[in-house]
Image: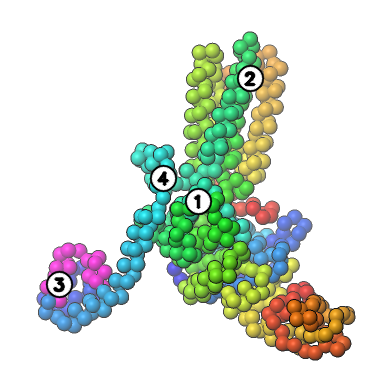
Amino acid sequence: MSAAAVIVDHVGKRYGARVALADVSFTAHGGVVTLLGPNGAGKSSLLRCLATVLAPDTGGLSVDGLDPRRPDQRTEIRRRLGYLPQDPRFAGSATVFDVVDYIGIVKEHRPVRTRHADVVRVLRAVGLEHHARDRIKTLSGGMVRRVGIAQALLGRPGLVVLDEPAAGLDPEQRLLLREQLSQLGEEATVILSTHLTDEAAAFSQHLYIVDTGRIVFGGPPAALVAAARGRVWLAAEPVSGPGVRRAWRTPTGWYRAIGDPPPGAHLDEPTLEDAYLLLVGSA
Amino acid sequence: MSGPHLDARHPDPGVLTAYAGRTLGPVAATAVELHLQGCAMCRDQVNQRVSAVEPARIENNLLAIAAEIDAPRHGVIERALVRSGLPVDTVRLLVATPSLRRSWFIAIGLALCFGLAAANPDRPDSSLLWFLGLAPLIPVIGVALAYGPGVDPAYEITLATPISGVRLVLLRTTAVLVTSIGIAGAVTLLMVPRHSLMVGAWLLPALALSIVCLALMTVVAPRVAAAAVSGTWLVAMIGCSGANDQLVAFRPAAQLGFVALGAVAALVVVARRSTFDVGRGEGPL
């Protein structure tokens, strides 16, 4: 299946009085797009709208020109979709193979032999081929998440929506995930979320920063870092002041500050985390 | 597909591709082989295609073999359902019903034993009311536990797939009704000698209340729907216990009322079936 064209157009969502998404717009067509933001920023709500399990209150979105508000078109979008929710859960007594096969059934993948071969393929992709007969309740949290990623890859969907795919994975598995996402981005549109800046830079070349329900930055990580140049400082003593947005002690004993120059500090090269904190702090 | 040319003309590229991929019919394949014997250029074309197709086919075959090995053997009930003629995929959907697990059956058994234990031989109407009042709630609770957020672990993932939500709900509801009514029905048969056929009067209320629960599930969460239906029913039963005829809710006139109630609720389910295809917007599922 070819990469899906995704358009998010002024999407808004409220939970009672709380605004989860406020006028969010972006487009994606192929490649890996990362939504980066703090907990509660609205990333999961946005991904759930994209996965057609949550309807926006305002605005709209489309996948390959299909509108999820129309039942027939929503079903067609779901045929092109692989989705990992934030907290993937499966019946504890079922085996890994059965769980993924079950998702293949509800995705209408037939015939059985082809679907079973696809189950093996996706389990191999996440390194769970030797755990096919294990019961879900015997797996660690990271392994359950890998089962969740595996089911999202069934049928080679054109749109893959992954909510915090790296949560709970060990470093080796994160590396494997990066490779998979890189390959996946060549044939599908992958939209994922994370709240960790190093993951965001490692996973994709294009990121959107979401804060309090709004997209406050969109572009490559390098552009975000460049925007923070001239606003990151190192000092030998604790720093404070009205223009200092954030300051913290580093493991080397120096004090790092972002914002206006504190007294006695010298300029330092910004990292993605610096740039992110500068941006999120000002939202 | 048109067959290859049998004369000196070269087969179409599509025919050569089909031959290399072993998807050509036997007669057409023989004709291509006759041509290849005398045509080095077409042999070369076929070789190129085979080298492109073979690795993918070998990989697919290996995956299929691994799937045969990895696919777990399924339980007795599942195998029996498949042998009875139900499609394999439908059986998989049924056995994944959360409320068809061992704990559910144990709960049914305990509930009915409780009902039987509460039966007072000195007051047959009262003891029968215990049973008739309790039995319809078993499928209602089972239906509420068959599908939905907080009950089905894979609910949100399933919601994002193309399967029709109402189809899944009805499949699971059917499975719950069959098992619940089957078990309660077996207990009913044990009670027939003491209470006559009146003991089976819970069946229509059970069906009607289950459908009402489904109808409410199009508006509120399944557990809320089950609580509302069960609560209303229990209040009605308490009211009946103080009436002159304690079994008034199970007499023929009331049974007709349950048929009507079930029919109206079924219409609501049909009219609002699309609500099973979208998540509720009140917050995280």
Can you tell which of label 1 and label 2 is closer to the viewer?
A: 1
The answer to whether one can see residue A52 in this image is: no
Tell me where residue A248 sits by quadrant: bottom right
The residue that mark 1 highlights is: A135
Does dot 1 land on a helix, a strand or a loop? loop
The residue that mark 2 highlights is: B118
Q: Is residue B50 left or right of residue B284?
A: left
Disc 1 and disc 2 in contact, CB within 8 angstroms: no
How far, Cα to Cα, is label 4 from label 2?
39 Å
Identify the residue shown where x is 48% and y is 74%: A183
How far, Cα to Cα, is label 3 from label 2?
82 Å
For the stretch drawn in magenta, the main secondary structure is: helix
Mark closer to the chain start, 3 or 2? 3
Magenta segment? B17-36
How far, Cα to Cα, is label 1 from label 2?
40 Å
Q: Position of residue B167 (x, y in %)?
A: 49, 46
Q: Is residue B271 left or right of residue B25?
A: right
Q: Chain of mark 1?
A: A
Q: Which mark is residue B74?
A: 4
Identify the residue shown where x is 70% and y is 77%: A273
Does dot 3 land on a helix, a strand or a loop? helix
Q: Are marks 1 and 3 on the same chain?
A: no
Q: Is residue A251 left or right of residue B122?
A: right
Q: Is residue A15 left or right of residue A160?
A: right
Given residues A138 and B30, the one toward you in this image is A138
Q: Chain of mark 2?
A: B
Instruction: Look at the image and say whether residue B153 sits in the magenta stretch.
Output: no
The residue that mark 3 highlights is: B33
The answer to whether one can see residue B10 in this image is: yes
Q: Are marks 1 and 4 on the same chain?
A: no
